[in-house]
Image: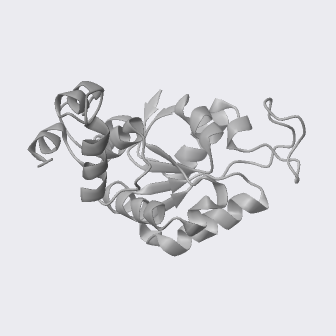
Amino acid sequence: MHKIKEVIVVEGRYDKNALSQVVDAVILETSGFGIFNNGQKQKLLRTMAEKRGLIVMTDSDSAGFVIRNFIKCCVDPKLVKHAYIPDVYGKEKRKSQASREGKLGVEGMRPKILLDALIRAGATLDEQSRVHTGPSITKADMFARGLSGGEGSAARRAALIRKLDLPEHMTADALLDVLNALMSREEFYELRL
């Protein structure tokens, strides 16, 4: 599995699941067209682009290109790389019928195709991708800081999310991914909660 520095943006959770089996990276979902009306998520994409850079990997259908073009408009284009999957016709295993255009999406691609698309886009792989030296922030660190698994942890997590100006409905796991992208473990322990 290759570690990738940039944050990868996909349309939905099935795309994220497929990609997370191929690469070790922070992967954010647009929730399809939900990104259009979600100012918090747009701001998160801008923040992550400034900190790590973005790679947009949407489906090769017309809806995927609409989402891709929207992201081009709301994030500085110099901070965005674009990974394109080929037009492969077929149907994803979980679906009863093919999509309107009959093309497989990110979730239906073979792992090698996904990795090749990221490499062609200029993804920063493996050793090149270390942003922070030292250990990553872990779930145990979140627990130790009172952000998970204890009484009042949801409220403390919500306060941290507000403080960092992140989307309010982030799960603890999503917050952990974002924290690791934004700061070192040492910086995490220096945060005033």
Residue 81 in sight: yes
The x and y percentages for residue 167 are 41, 56
Q: Nearer the viewer, residue 129 or 41?
A: 41
Q: Is residue 136 visible?
A: no
Which residue is found at the position 40% from the left and 57% from the top?
53
In the image: residue 182, left or right of residue 86: left
What scheme was used to colour the molecule? one colour
Q: Residue at x 62, y 46 (%)?
A: 12
Against 48, residue 124 (above or below) is above
Q: Quadrant of residue 105?
A: top right
Which residue reaches farthest front? Answer: 151
In terms of depth relative to the viewer, which is nearer, 67 or 85?
Answer: 67
Horizontal placement of 66 versus 57: left or right? right
Q: Is residue 38 left or right of residue 109?
A: left
Q: Residue at x 49, y 72 (%)?
A: 74
Q: Position of residue 121 (x, y in %)?
A: 54, 53
Q: In the image, is residue 101 above or below residue 47?
A: above
Residue 117 position in % (x across, y down):
61, 45
Number of marks in the image? 0
Instruction: Give the residue displayed 62% in from the left and 33% down from the top.
Output: 18
Identify which residue, 46 or 88, lies in the foreground.
46
- Residue at the bottom extreme, as displayed: 73
- The one of 173 and 71 positioned closer to us in this rendering: 173
Q: Is residue 1 rendered to the left or right of residue 136? A: right
Kindly indicate the quadrant of the structure image that contains residue 22: top right
Residue 164 rendering spot, x and y as whole percentages: 27, 57
